[in-house]
Amino acid sequence: MAKVTITIYVNGESYETLVKPSTTLLDFLRDHLFLTGTKKGCNTGECGACTVILDGKVVNACLVLAVDASGSHVTTVEGLGDAEHPHLLQVAFAEHGAIQCGYCTPGMLISSKALLDRNPNPSEAEIKMTLAGNLCRCGGYLKIIEAIKSVVKT
Amino acid sequence: MKEFQYVMPATLEEAVSLTAQYGMKSALLAGGTDLIVQMKRGLKSPSCIINLKRIRELKYICYSPEKGLSIGPLIAHNELSEHRAIVENYPLLAEAARTIGTFQIRERGTIGGNICNASPAADTIPPLICLGAKLRLQGSAEERTTGIEDFFEGPQKTRLKPDEVLTQIEIPILPPCTGGIYLKLGVRKALEVAIVGVATLLTLDDQKTCVGARIALASVAPIPLPCHRAEAALVGEKIGDKVIDQAAKEVQEEAVPISDLRGTAEYRREMIYVLTKRALNEAFKRIVG
Amino acid sequence: MVEAYHIIGKKVPRLDALSKAMGDLKYVSDLYLPGVLVGRVLRSPLPHGKILHIDISKAVRLSGVKAAITAEDTPRKKFCMNPTWANNMILQDEKVRYVGDQVAAVAAIDEDTASEAISLIKVDYEPLPAVFDPEEAMKPGAPKIHREENNIVVHSVRNFGDVERGFREADYICEGNFYSPAIAHCCLEPRGCLASYDLSGNLRVWATTQTPHPLREELSEVLGIPQNKVSVFQAPMGGAFGARMGMDPIDGIAAILSMKSQRPVKVVNTREEEFLSSRIRYPMNIWIKSGTKKDGRLVAREIKVITDNGAYNHEGQYIMGNAGSKLAQLYAVPNIRYNGFLVYTNNVYGGAFRGYGNPQITYAMEIQLDQIAEALQMDPAEIRMINANKPNSVTASGCEIGSCGLIECIKTVAENSKWEEKKRARKEERSLLRRGIGMACMIHGGSGVKFFWGKDCNFSSAIVKINTDGSIDLLTGSAELGQGSNTTLAMIVAEVLGVSLSNINIINGDTDTTPACLGAWGSRQTFTAGNATQYAAMEARKMLFEVASELLEARVQDLEAKSGNIFVRGTPEKYVTVKQAAAESWRNRGNPIIGKGVNVDPWSIQPDLKTGYGNVSSAYAFAAQAAEVEVDTETGFVNVIHFWCAHDVGKAINPLGAECQIEGGVISMGLGYALMENLILHGGKAQNTNFTDYKIPTMLDTCQIKTYFIESLDEHGPFGAKGVGEPAMIPSAAAIANAIYDAVGIWVTELPITPEKVLKAINEKQKSKG
């Protein structure tokens, strides 16, 4: 089948390229753009490790076709901050012990950022509801909630 | 995933003509939260994917106290569950949408997708049945309207014709003194497919006698299940423990649950009774306060 | 005496946390080498069958496929972590023995081509009768899975004391059956391996492995490549929990695909493969009998356990043995009999999983103890206090308990959970939602064990190098799984050398550059690698002090290191910096500062192979956990509200790290193990191979949790520390089960405790009442 030209904006930069229609946004980010911060945990939209912000909404990148994201704005964990200017959430996660193996972390950070963008003062119930789609097997979630709350207070 | 052709019609007319052209070989793409998973698992391999998301006329929510609610199929579950008109006037639908999958799935998955995917466990369908929803379907030759109850044939099977697109979900105004709820039973508190789901809607007169009753269940039959016998048993009765108990037992009789990964038929049967009782009680409380 | 440390005991965020938060850290699936190919595996759809013929010709001819292999392309060497038990192969040649067994593999230019190539491989099987129930598999006439006469891998019996006499002398005896099912690790990162074989015959492997040095040895042995031509790099891991211990077939598959295609090859499991064909927690059917005196003191314990080994050997005999060993260890019961059968079936095979058999046996032991308490009308906390292990004691099986804070653990959770108050509270018989509180204890090795490879094998080694700018490199063979061991080891170096943590660079799990260590398992790294690291740091400090003593014209024994300076104790204003001393040693004495440390764990032994007697671990960790639940008596749904966890960790080197382990162990694993996890096998095939149908707790399923560290200061551990990784989840399920009993008067003895099972038990109890 013919490849399709897409233009996607990722972390503020625009990319124009040819992709097969069956390429997911997740594979596009990881394999074409080498933005490997977004992780593949299950590839079927159940673990949240591939969470990105797509036109302001948190979605599982493994369930979005890259062609379907043409013209859209995507934020991945690489777009949150860097060593010089880390995002408050990244610092809070690190300081509160909210990161163990780190595999769920990019997805958790993206979901947290989107939550705070939508509601700068979420309740604990809202935090849990929003992040319930980000699975963690190491950490038990409580330190992640603490980290988010600490950013809310500031 | 097997490779496919990808088209993105700009108008409804274009979309319908594509579905007519490709028929059963095509699949309509809304949020993709069901379709993409099915394609990855090899359960579906359409040779053409028709992405509906450019068609603005399929994405809207309109409410008026006179006409009721009209939703386009491309409304995502989160948007639906947060919309003021729906929260205020049709809370059980908002509640049901909120129980689906995860937040990420709800941001992307649509009500049209939930209906047309036709899982017997779909959460929005029992409330829609209770609310008397009508579906408007646009085909190449004609447009038709069907009650949602008549839309399902079997698990993952609807009566949508190969050349049709779902264009609207209409929900009428509810009479005064009407209340309802959707309850979902799962082992976890998120990322769950219902072991049993129960939607109820009751209308009372000023004597607290039931003048209208709707009950519909998820995960207890090959299709989402309206329980008309139980409903009939409630109409004309004063709502109380005994009446609710009998209605719940009637629902148990109407349901045909199976044993699967999520639970045995015996447990489901017992939960049908428990959840129906609770849902009827809650619906009643929501009316009387 | 409480020591004042400058960093030990402080809450320290992980050193690699920010790199993970940036999405910068590269896991195996993020790694690229030029020309890397995608590897995929063809797996058996049958639980048992002869492989008659494999036709890979169409796959080979597919454009984009660079290699397609079957067993013929491999050295056909059987492997297992301990080669004595080897019966698995990189690719099967004669038979397939479980659904998911590896039969062939391809390497292609991309994912789609690799998948298509797999679908083009035709395998002719002759289906054979299969057996899935270990009790059926034990019977004569059951289908033979391997060459052995019957399917019993191991039948082991252990006797300590005199169990018959013990039961004769008991005032009360209780017996019962318990079952723990197949459980999946659910590491968020699927297993992967990137292998690159170059034209000079060097094999480099980046693997999700907990045991880099042993993996190198295994790969070398199985592939027939000298060890010094095999390099294993432990990639950062998205979870391990025992799943990544020892070689996995995909490690060998990636290596051989690379050899054949002459390109790097990356093989990464799909999530479905993770559920279908990855090692699981060994299912165990446990019959247990306990006898106590009137006052609740345990005098005898006996079990018969039948463990489902699955199709191939991995660590079943050790895990089953470890489970059995807890009979004598927990509460130092004097008279023990353990009768264990490890049985082949055509199910997916087991492997190491956090707790190593201990969660299964603790579930049985700790519920039975509550049942005894109930019968004797004793408080469950009280019966545990009476039976608790004491410091400096020896168990009937020869375990030398040194440090032990179990009584303190029990007291701490009882006090903080308001145990007495809650137990005394009148339970409202008619209420829909009923609350209850329950407790469970555990013992676990806190330093690793010597039962795997040889007679005296539990070592770790480390090198500490101090550079001329004062920066420090720690080279450790240990594995960082995300459990925080790198941070803990760096803290030890920082404490010994008196420098700040930011000065320390850690290189770990790289077999080219780091000295050998057996890896991360058995909660051993804090203790074993920690000791080795401490020794290495101390040797480096000795070299520094020798130089500094000359520069300061002082005696070595009067020197102290703090805040990057070395000075005579009492006169900190007259100092040389670590940097100065290191540079001086390098430049003017030609003696670069390199400290080496090896810990051979001299305090434990490999238990006697016949009797099982011996001090299997140098230190033992203890814990008590209490759980409060609320049960919906109409649906059976159990809501866990609160956990109180008191863990004797010896010394919490990094309390933040230890807290993380415990919270994660209880919530992300313990809750799941207790209430919802079960890999459902029908005809040997896993049915729930995704995260919707195989349930692990989500953020909405969390409970509150309070953690307490009991610091019994083990004399052998670095700064007194013992392991915490596994203990975190060992007693959690039993605590929940006991809390449910307190709430609704029923015990569920078959895991998981689903709402359906709870409701069934409640209904049965009601029926029997009236």
Image: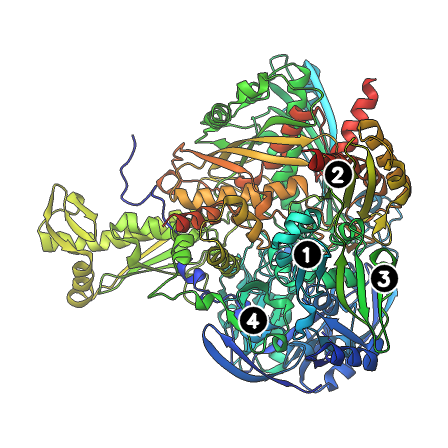
Identify the mark nearer the N-term, 2 or 3.
Answer: 3
Identify the mark nearer the N-term, 1 or 2.
Answer: 1
Q: Nearer the viewer, mark 2 or mark 3?
A: 3
Q: Are the residues flagged by discs 4 and 3 from a single subunit? A: no
Number of the label disc, if any, that sits on residue B146: 3
Whether residue B164 is visible: yes
Residue placed at 59% from the left, 17% from the top?
Answer: C425
Label 3 resides on the chain identified as B
- Around disc 4, counting alpha carbons within 10 Å, would you say few (fewer than 14), some (14 to 19), or many (20 or more)? many
- Around disc 3, counting alpha carbons within 10 Å, would you say few (fewer than 14), some (14 to 19), or many (20 or more)? some
| Residue at mark 2 to residue at mark 3: CA–CA distance | 27 Å
Q: Quadrant of residue B4?
A: bottom right
Residue that badge 2 annotates: B279
Label 1 resides on the chain identified as B
* Label 1 secondary element: strand
Q: Amino acid at mark 4?
A: Leu
Q: Is residue C512 left or right of residue B191?
A: left
Residue C255 is situated, as x and y percent measured from the top left of the image, at 60, 72
Residue that badge 4 annotates: C194
Q: Are the residues flagged by discs 2 and 3 from a single subunit? A: yes
Q: Is residue C176 above or below residue B104?
A: above
Residue that badge 1 annotates: B64
* Label 3 secondary element: strand
Residue B239 is situated, as x and y percent measured from the top left of the image, at 80, 31
